[in-house]
Amino acid sequence: MSQREAVHDRVNRYACMTVEQMMRELALDSKGLTERQAAVRRKRYGSNAPAAHKQDSVRHCLRRAFVNPFSVILFVLGWLSFGTDVLLPETYQKSFSTVWIIFFMLVISGAVRLVQELRAREVAEKLERMVHTTVQVWRDDTWTECSSELLVVGDRVRVEAGDRVPADLRVIEASDLFVSQSVITGESMVLEKTPERLPNQPNTLNGYDNILFGGTTVAGGSGTGIVLAVGQQTVYGGLSPQLGARRQGFERGAHAIAGVLIRFMAVLTPVVFLASGLTKRNWGEAFLFALSVAVGLTPELLPMVVNACLAKGSASMGRKQTIVKNINAMQGFGSMDTLCVDKTGTLTDDTLQPEYYMDILGNECRKTLDYAYLASRYHTGVGNQIDTALCRAAEMPGQEQYYLDLERLCPKLDERPFDYTRGVSSVLLKENGQNLLILKGGVDQVVGRCNRAEYKGKITPAETDVLFSAHAVVDEMLEDGMKVIALAYKPVQETVLSDQLEEDCILLGYIAFFDAPRQSAASAIGKLQALHVKVKVLTGDQKPVALSICRRLGIDDEFCLTGRELEELTEDDLPTALEKTAIFAELSPRQKARVVENLQGNGHVVGFLGDGMNDLPAMLQADVGISVENATDAVRESASVILLKKDLNVLEEGILEGRKAFANMIKYIKITASSNFGNICAIVAASVLLPFFPMTSVQLLLLNLLYDLLCLVLPWDRVDKELTEQPLEWSGRTLGRFMRFFGPISSVFDFVTFWFLYFVLCPGVCGGQFAALTAEGRAQFIAIFQTGWFLESLWTQVLILQLLRTPKLPFLQSRPGGMVVAVTVPGVILFTLLPVTSLGSMLGMAPMPWRYFAFLAVVVAAYLLLVSLAKGWYVKRQRQLL
């Protein structure tokens, strides 16, 4: 039996046991576990750390740094070189230099990436601690607060409304405990959990009435449970790879880019191998050279440069009151073209004020306010603005004793928290010796459950169209942007609430609240629209309220869809309707997620900003989930980005930082790949035309590595304002076109350099053409030729990076970052001096005469001029450079 099957069996067995039987079998007592017992159980049953944390362990960082396609190719090259240069030759011909160089490059490139990843891991852990989730756990005979990651099987945990269940728990105590399992079942219903044992094993997850599954959220009440499974052994942990598959926009883009590079590699590498083998008649050396071409075509430090750009952007946002928990979300910010926001607290001030409390005809009615207060006071579900505002009524001067007496005279018996399937919440209390049900919720939902109405103390049968009468009273307030709820009640005999008991109630009246629009929201929305980010409002509020608020903030209110209208749309009509609609009202959590999913299906990169439980499904669905510091635990845990200040202006800054990080990534990928492609095209031709290799495999690898090391400063490069004005696409769609256009331009100047070196410079230095030279002369000829092309490739690659980093004139209209200049200029000078060092001699290089550098200056200047002209034509035709 696998470990996962054993855990599943454990959950099933304990669900069908009494609490006492389970405690005995798990060897638990009333004092809870000690820290030593917890450590033992952690080793036995596993850790509660999420999979993402395991992937960030030092061991996994080591594996990613040294075990990847590029390092594997280097490793293979090293051993092949060991065979060809050390094992096969005679003793006096053996040479370890190539082997040492290759393995040195392997270690250096891996070490640089490892250091960078460990630093990023340390930053991420600091950020995680700022928004860390803690739980109440019973240890050593006392309740203590600890990280949810420290939980072990057998721990006793306490959960309350708004908490995210930290592990699979067997309920042992419950007080009106209601849970939403939509994150694992997809169903929006709220289920009540109790400690009673199950008679037999259920067929569905919704049948486990005494099990709290990790990852689900507590919608109401409180409870205590014993941990049965942790981490990846939980039901949610097993589903997490599937649940996380929706948030793979960064990976999809990275794979698309890798796919383009691999296709170029798959075509060119065999061509180089065959051309080299047929012309040089040395298939072993040709194979080694072809492998180095494969490495040279694909930037070997690509993952590290990308991570550095993302980490730089993440750190910049951290200084702007924004925590980026997942640095891949920086790319999402850069690509995001649609932002979905909840209305309450995002577009409004998040401070509801009760304006009116009325009877069914709109007259002031104190009984309506009293019943509403009791319903909110006894509500143990996830906190919301309406309940908070109603409970503040008891804090009004002179009202404290009145409401204390009201609570004493009307004790609570039972409750059912709000859920979006019913659209109401209810409490059962005792008033004057009689059980009384109070129903509170949306106007349509409450009125639809009433068949009678109270007016001035008299109860009469409701009118035929009671809903029409209700809207005659409340519609004007809704159109003014007020939020209106309805109150109903019903005397009952029962002591436990149910769906049936909530029907046939007595309509009492309405309460209207005003939530003023945020002063900063209108300007923030204007800034987002200027960045070509469409803002769409997804709210559960009534349509008139949403329209009123959005109209004041300048959001397009020509089209508005309600949840009911959304369900009535056909699959053919839905995509078009979503594009032209900016306001969605009266939505359930499932419908919010559906809107986000279909917007993604339309090709948009979607961000979602929310803070309540009703926002969780949409946040999980979005490409970038954004929450705030004071959001519910479940929502905050699920978000990739957390705002320490709930302000859309902060998002505008985040989008700009994301686009800057994205632009610097694309600079590296496109420019490097196209330059490498041009070099490889030249190599293919040279391999056929020349009697020797234009560059050794080690020189080619070293050239690529040195250039990549210089590119590590790109995250600190300046980004033109024009590049941040539009959402940027993270894919390989335009990479191939960029490579095919700019790559051959460098090939032309490579051919010019080949001609000059082969027919002019090398014969002049060595005293004749290659075929007429002695073996020693030929070796000198080859060394000068390879060194000359190495230096020309290095200079053109570095300078073309400066030229193509911007569609403007470099240095004049667009200055590079100070750190970029400070690193690249000394770097190029040092690498130019490499041939005169002992390391250069080991690599087969030779000092170059001064007349070569005069030629190099002319070639580089001509190359830059031609690329500048080509860049202008490319931008004019494609309307973009990067």
Image (cartoon, rainbow, N blue to C red):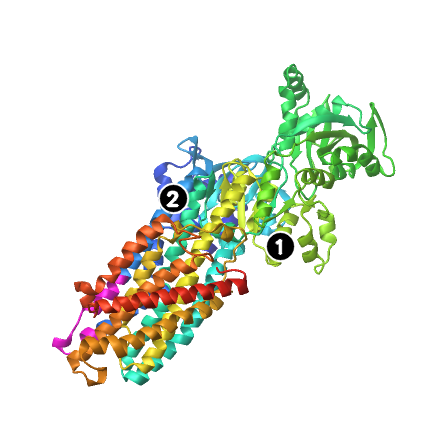
Q: Looking at the image, which residue is at 31% across and 50% down?
A: 822
Is disc 2 placed on a helix, strand or loop?
helix
Q: Which residues are magenta?
A: 84-105
Q: Is residue 111 left or right of residue 647?
A: left
- Horizontal relation, residue 245 to residue 110: left or right: right
Mark yes or no: residue 89 visible: no
Looking at marks 1 and 2 on the same chain, the residue that comes earlier in the sequence is marked by 2
Asked whether 617 or 562 is in front, the reply is 562
Q: Is residue 31 left or right of residue 762?
A: right
Say which of 4 and 47 sits in front: 47
Q: CA distance from mark 1 to mark 2?
A: 33 Å
Q: Is residue 51 above or below residue 69?
A: above
Label 1 environment density (alpha carbons within 10 Å; few <14, some 14–19, many ≥20): many
Q: Position of residue 648 (x, y in %)?
A: 56, 40
In the image, taking residue 3 as reference, residue 568 lies left or right, namely right
- Give the SS element for disc 1: helix
Please tell me how many numbered marks the rendered image carries: 2
In this orientation, does residue 311 appear?
Answer: yes
- Name the residue beneath numbered marker 1: 599
Picture coordinates of residue 842, whole percent (x, y) = 18, 67
Rendered view: 498 above or below 364:
below
Q: Is residue 86 magenta?
A: yes
- Tell which of 342 and 672 is nearer to you: 672
> Which residue is labeled 2 in the image?
123
Please, what is the dominant secondary structure of the magenta stretch? Answer: helix
Q: Quadrant of the N terminus?
A: bottom left
The quarter holding residue 139 reads top left
Q: Residues within 10 Å of mark 2 (few under 14, many from 20)?
A: some
- Name the residue type under label 2: Val
Residue 834, position as x, y percentages in the image: 22, 62
